[in-house]
Amino acid sequence: MQPRAPVLLSSLAAALALVLAACGGPSRPLPEQTSQPASPAMAPAPRPDHDHAARAAQSKPVAEMHSIEPHATLAMPHPYPLPAPAPEERERYGAIDENGVRLVAQAPVSTFSIDVDTGSYSNVRRLLNAGRVPPADAVRVEELLNYFPYDYAQPADGRPFAVHTALAPAPWHPSNVLLRIGIKGKDVASGALPAANLVFLVDVSGSMNAPDKLPLLKSSLKLLVNQLRAQDRITLVTYAGSTRVALPPTPGSDKAAISAAIDQLVAGGSTAGASGIALAYQAAQQSYIAGGINRVLLATDGDFNVGVTDFRQLRSMVEDKRKSGVSLSTLGFGTGNYNEQLMEQLADAGDGAYSYIDNLMEGNKVLVSEISSTLATIARDVKIQVEFNPATVTEYRLIGYENRMLAREDFNNDKVDAGDIGAGHTVTALYELTLAGQPGLVDPLRYQRAAPAPGRDGELAHVRLRYKLPAASTSQLLDVTVARQALRPLAQGDDDFRFAAAVAGFGQVLRGGRFTGDWRHADARALAQGARGADRFGYRGEFVKLVDLAQSLATITPAASGGNDPATRAAR
């Protein structure tokens, strides 16, 4: 037997020569290899899978390795597969330009419309419970404030609501003062409400095919069915690619028929929201009750994609329809493609309220516990105007209500629309004030000094409200003066004041903390925890837990976003 070493050496030498021939020297065109068969040593083979090639090379004798093509062993590795793209975020929120600090010497009057919407709070809750820090534009501080009931005194003078003011230091700037304006609508028992003509406009398009959309909507509507009276009328209009009346006007006493119609709702198709709105208003007009409650309740995720889909056109359409005496409220559902901007603005345009229903408990709150305030309007076009005394107040800032601001001249103009207040509703607004002699955010002017108003040096502000009774076209005026002597230490403020301050501070922290300095989640939690009071429905206790959750999420946000978002900056 001949020794194997010479054979092995010659084979390796041949392989090395082939490699050098392939890699070195000037480039030459490769000869055509279709005219004659290639030798087994030189024939190109299909490029193998690299793992398979490695296993094959290991299994061959060393003497045979020269038959593996050089380019196969030197090939680039397969690229590592990229992760699947994250699902597109389609939720839409209107941009909010946060109210800034105003100098009383330059702008002594602040005017805005009330707002009874609460949808921002429950939507923020949904986002936090899903492990997400809410986008800044999802946080409307006034809707966080007005989500909670406050124990303001009932009106005692025959008016539809009472106005209360209070003063205490701002928790995030103790040298500044918080002015609270609280409105309490008169309570009306649900059994004493006028007869109701309610048209439920339900989105049954394909986008509603999710557990937190149509199924939750149906369960929420069924809660309302048990509250209906014989004098009430319910109509059910649905829309997807087309619209139809799923339930003609039906007395509230026929609960079985109403429930059966709700049960039959199924999701599928595109979303022709504008045509649905038109049909719902038409149905409401056909069953109109003079002196009663006439309202369309739009229940949807707001993802309109057929017909009129432009936000401004839809708002204009609803503004025109409200002239018929039929109001529109919105009930938001779902995640992923939720159009929050549309839902909030349609309710504002329709003289109704915007609610977001993220669970059945919220459905019960809106459609059962607060049904009177949800449906029954006790005052329309409610406007607030505050004049600050330049001798005692140098700066002010309205917290929230950014998309409810009005021009000064709009206050006395009864043609300018404003928010409505329902039976039993509470509305809260907070101003942060810098008093004369305290450091402000804006440098004082050198030459413009306010002369004290004779006999007014003990006043901080004068608050005026205008409103119309439900059937009136002319407004009435109500006013109250805010005296400096009403200022009390924050610790001596009532639970409602301190809790509202905690909610307002938390909302500002979620928005980035532009005006709250070093005040953080933990401060909001401590203040809210100490102001829970009786908390009959557990709403305040839930708020404390949400603050804890928001703080935990904010501490991990830098790993995901680089720490440049407002919530992350506020957590530092």
Image (cartoon, helix red, strand yellow):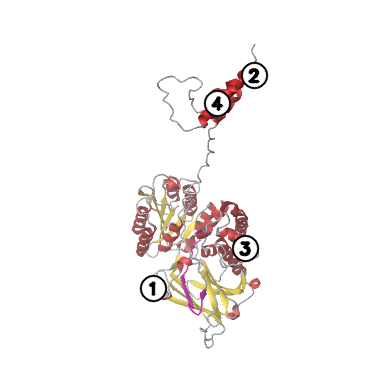
The residue type indicated by label 4 comes to Ala
Residue 94 is situated, as x and y percent measured from the top left of the image, at: 46, 60
- Which quadrant is home to the N terminus? top right
Q: Which mark is residue 520?
A: 3
Nearer the camera: disc 2 or disc 3: 2
Q: CA distance from mark 1 to mark 4?
A: 97 Å
Nearer the camera: disc 4 or disc 3: 4
SS for dot 4: helix
Question: Does any portion of residue 537 appear in the rendered image?
Answer: no
Q: Which mark is residue 414?
A: 1
- Could you tell me how many numbered marks the image carries? 4
Nearer the camera: disc 1 or disc 4: 4
For label 4, the residue is: 17
Q: Which mark is residue 5?
A: 2
Farthest residue in the top direction? 1
Q: CA distance from mark 1 to mark 3?
A: 42 Å
Q: Would you say the residues marked 4 and 3 are in contact, meaning their CB atoms lie under 8 Å apart?
A: no
- 2 or 3: tag closer to the N-terminus: 2
Q: Is 178 located above or below residue 506 in the figure?
A: below
The residue type indicated by label 3 comes to Arg
Q: Which residues are magenta?
A: 102-120
Q: Would you say the residues marked 2 and 1 are in contact, meaning their CB atoms lie under 8 Å apart?
A: no
Q: Is 535 located above or below residue 237 in the figure?
A: below
- 1 or 3: tag closer to the N-terminus: 1
Q: CA distance from mark 4 to mark 3?
A: 73 Å
Residue 83 is situated, as x and y percent measured from the top left of the image, at: 53, 42
- 4 or 3: tag closer to the N-terminus: 4
